Image: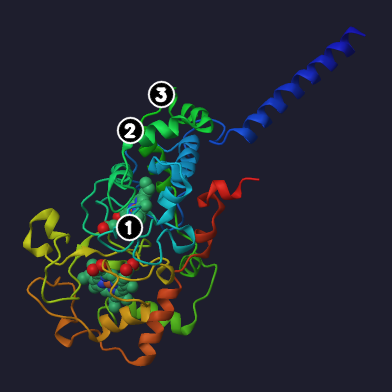
Amino acid sequence: MNKILSIVCFCLFLFFIFSCEKENVKTIPGGINNEKYNFYIPKNFPTKLYIPEDNPLTYSGIELGRYLFYDGRLSGRTHPDSLMSCYSCHKQELSFEAGFHPKGITGISTPNEMLPMINLVWNPNTLLWNGKVKNIEDLVWMGVIAPHEMNGDTNRTRELIASIPMYAEMFKRAFGTEEITFKQISYAIAQFVRTLVSSDSKFDRYMRGEAKLTDSELNGYFLFTTEEGADCFHCHGGDGNPLFTTNLFYNNGKDDVFTDTRDRFSVTQNTKDIGAYKATTLRNISFTGPYMHDGRFKTIEEVVEFYNSGLKNSPYINPLMHKINDGGARLNDKQKNDLLAFLRTLNDSVFITNPAYSNPFKNKK
Ligand code: HEC
Ligand code: HEC
């Protein structure tokens, strides 16, 4: 009898423990603990990740960062008309771009067009079109303060976020302290951004032997990665570099007069950087227009025509623009179509629909 009673008690005890745990998982977002995030490195990708030593990725940190990324209260305001989050400009379905030249909360346009948030954990260099900002953590401070973004105040944001009951437990799980600081806010968002990985385009599947490219796409790939072809790979990778960017800065021959005060030169003061900007990744290129730092091209067709016949020479053009003496690659119509077909194989629908990157407020039941 005693034995049965103790078994019943033990079962009740187990039931109690499990139901508590389930309740916790359901009501408190932020993962179950602050275990180290198991970063999956896709096949053919570099194994070196750029994660600051003092901000390692944890499950609870990433989940917290995801909530903050999508939370309009990050702007330090509560009125629905005044809410702005990272998501206001960085939309998952557009590879974390806006699709147009965005304006900040005050109506002031951002100085440049958008950049995507793709595979930044492999970027050893600095961020933005001109490389002015060192890391993602710093960009969060900038996003909250900049007049062309949230035009806010980090203290006000910190106070508002700290007053939201849901976050108290999430910060505790992520950082182990009761106190909420703006530094932690920036660290959590940076952790989330570092998990955004695109590795499932048709081209990736082709490289893994899981998909076939058409003859046109294959010819485009050949043009992209050969000097006698369109000669794109020196700056945009593709020749064994799956990131489709070198993360470096070049003057790619768009202009012959340079007046922009926010080019790479403005950061380095090195004259070889006049008119130079980051060669962005070409992953998901169909979703990230308008193109170039100033959005001068609306379609990829226009961009390809620029590289084909629109190059302008200047003392500052990068020596890797080998086709400059011909004004461009001078491809025929079929070759241009093939190059475009190849560029479209870099679109990754898994990335733009991945539930792990999506708006957690929208998906909550
Ligand atoms: C008002 C629109 C807007 C908001 C809000 C915004 N961004 Fe951006 N973001 C931009 C623009 C525009 C750029 C490119 C700016 C440049 O280089 O001049 C950019 C660039 C970036 C980059 C650089 C990517 C790279 O490859 O170098 C990161 C990372 C980023 N933003 C993160 C964030 C985060 C995190 C937030 C929220 C705290 C945020 N942004 C809020 C418009 C915005
Ligand atoms: C010398 C280096 C270099 C070479 C070679 C080069 N590019 Fe670029 N590419 C850049 C730079 C730098 C930018 C950004 C320039 C800017 O914003 O002003 C860019 C931008 C682009 C963009 C727009 C990206 C965006 O998100 O706005 C596309 C598309 C592109 N290049 C495709 C190509 C193709 C196709 C080729 C080959 C025909 C090529 N590039 C060759 C350096 C290069």
What secondary structure is found at the residue carrying circle 2?
helix
Kindly indicate whether the residue at mark 2 contacts the one at mark 3 (C-beta within 8 angstroms). Answer: no
The residue lying furthest to the right in this view is 1
Where is residue 286? Give x, y as percent: 43, 72
Q: Earlier in the sequence, mark 3 or mark 1?
A: 1
Label 3, label 1: how far apart the Cα atoms are: 34 Å
Asked if residue 225 can be seen in this view, the reply is no
Q: Nearer the viewer, mark 3 or mark 1?
A: 1
Q: Quadrant of the C terminus?
A: top right
- Circle 3 residue: 179
Mark linked to residue 155: 2
Q: Nearer the viewer, residue 158 or 292?
A: 158
Label 3, label 2: how far apart the Cα atoms are: 13 Å
Task: Tell me: is circle 3 under 8 Å from ligand 1.
Answer: no
Residue 279, by quadrant, is bottom left
Q: Nearer the viewer, residue 87 or 94?
A: 87
**Which residue lies at the image location 35% right of the left edge and 35% below the top edge?**
156
Give the residue type at disc 2.
Asn
Q: Earlier in the sequence, mark 3 or mark 2?
A: 2
**Which residue lies at the image location 36% right of the left edge and 87% below the top edge?**
335
Q: Quick check: which quadrant has ligand 2?
A: bottom left
Task: Tell me: is circle 1 under 8 Å from ligand 1.
Answer: no
Q: Nearer the viewer, mark 1 or mark 2?
A: 1
Other residues around mark 2 within 10 Å, as few (<14) / some (14–19) / many (≥20): few
Q: Earlier in the sequence, mark 1 or mark 2?
A: 1
Kindly indicate whether the residue at mark 1 contacts the one at mark 3 (C-beta within 8 angstroms). Answer: no
